[in-house]
Amino acid sequence: MPELTSLPETVEFTEPRSRTHTWSLPASYAAAGRLTGLELLRLTIDGGLPQPPICGTLGFRLVEAHEGRAVFEGETGEHLLNPMGSVHGGYLATLLDSALGCAVMTTLAAGRAYTTVQLGVNLVRPVFADTERLRCEGTVIHAGRTTATAEARVTGADSGKLYAHATTTCAVFAWQGTS
């Protein structure tokens, strides 16, 4: 194979772009330890608590929370592209993990927390910078004292096209964080 010493003349580069975002530390969740998971998530949706920092970083947000169910919506963009020109699979995995974990969180009593211990992701269709707004709905399958499982799907918010789906297992435990 010949050694590549330069790019073809047809490749053009644009000026670097920038993206700025702000966030609040999620420490308020720890301070609100007397609230159930569902109450914390509903406060987040209503603006009483900040969205998690990852939401601002990647451009998605929690929009619904019900017992056993959480929904996020997100916009893609060129800041999420991989070298192939499609949105990096890590964006979809993070969106799925967020909906899965928050679905589990809706079932937690005050003073309880969770962490993901297993995440299985299936990407079924490419996502691009101009793909429609995405909707990710997570639903609890099992909520036990020490473990919980959930499933989620990423679909086009308007078209309903399936882009990805996932399952998770979460460990459930007493909150030991600091406020």
Image: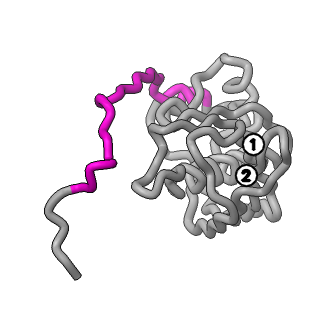
Work out whether residue 104 or residue 34 is closer to the camera in this orientation and state it: 104
**Above or below for 59 versus 97:** above
* Quarter residue 143 falls in: bottom right
**Is label 1 in a helix, a strand or a loop?**
strand
**Above or below for 61 versus 137:** above
At label 1, the amino acid type is Arg
Do the residues under discs 1 and 2 have CB atoms within 8 angstroms?
A: yes
**Residue 64: horizontal and vertical position, in percent?**
79, 34
Is residue 14 toward the left or the right of residue 163 in the image?
A: left
**Residue 34: horizontal and vertical position, in percent?**
66, 31
Residue at figure coordinates x 81%, y 53% from the top left: 161
- Bounds of the magenta span? 7-32
Is residue 68 toward the left or the right of residue 54 in the image?
A: right
Q: Is residue 37 magenta?
A: no
At label 2, the amino acid type is Val
**Above or below for 116 versus 2:** above
**Residue 71: horizontal and vertical position, in percent?**
76, 41
Q: Residue furthest front?
A: 9
Q: Is residue 20 magenta?
A: yes
Q: Which residue is mark 2?
A: 154
Q: Does residue 30 appear in the picture of this structure?
A: no
Work out whether residue 141 or residue 146 is closer to the camera in this orientation and state it: 141
Q: Which residue is mark 1?
A: 135
Is residue 54 toward the left or the right of residue 72 in the image?
A: left
- Examine the residues drawn in magenta and state their main secondary structure: loop
Residue at figure coordinates x 73%, y 52% from the top left: 154
